Amino acid sequence: MCEICNEFNRFDYHDSKLLTFQLLRRGTTHEFVEDFCFDIELSMDANNNYEKAKLILKDCRIILLDLDLVGKQECSDHIASAICQDSSELKTNLINKYFQYEQNALTGYLHFQIILIPPGGSADVFAKNFELLKCNRP
């Protein structure tokens, strides 16, 4: 597995809270990339201690959201799991369905998946990198 995936997967996102998300554009008008940013409360322990953080998925190509916002709210915004993979069944299916003539379309893109506690839904993002910024460090 790739180094970026290992770094992302070392965090335990279970029981963290996904609060907000937004698409951010950076760069010039003609040369820009788009990042997808999640504001989260990162679960620090079993005692409901949280640390505010920003999870930024950098240089995105595809973002698939399947969110039930009422379900998300009913489950207190909790994340069930999150994973980063270099290859996945979804990545293969997208290439076969949408990029038949451009087989290398997702080369260099990683599959970041965030699954909320059911029935909250999930976010599947194909991006090149990530950054996790903890906001309330001592």
Image (cartoon, rainbow, N blue to C red):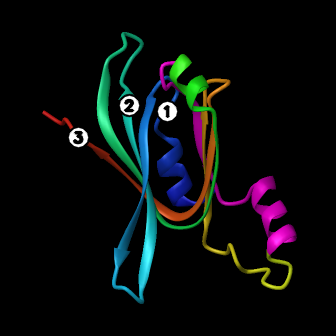
Looking at this view, name the residue that lies furthest to the left: 138
CA gap, disc 1 to disc 3?
16 Å
Image coords of residue 53 (percent x, y): 32, 40
Q: Which mark is residue 42?
A: 2
Looking at this view, name the residue that lies furthest to the front: 70
Q: Type of residue at label 3?
A: Cys
Q: Is residue 17 left or right of residue 134?
A: right
**Pointer 1 residue:** 13
Q: Type of residue at label 2?
A: Leu
Residue at 55% of width from left, 64% of height from top? 127
Residue at 61% of width from left, 73% of height from top? 108
Q: Which mark is residue 135?
A: 3
Label 2 vs 3, first from the N-terminus: 2
Q: For numbered disc 1, what is the local secondary structure?
A: loop
The answer to which quarter of the image holds residue 95 is bottom right
| Quarter of the figure with the N terminus | bottom right
Binning the other alpha carbons within 10 Å of mark 3 as few (below 14), some (14 to 19) or many (20 upward) gives: few
Chain part drawn in magenta: 75-98
Image coords of residue 78 (percent x, y): 51, 24
CA gap, disc 1 to disc 2?
7 Å
| Quarter of the figure with the C terminus | top left
Residues at badges 1 and 2 in contact (C-beta under 8 Å)? yes
Image coords of residue 65 (percent x, y): 63, 48
CA gap, disc 2 to disc 3?
10 Å
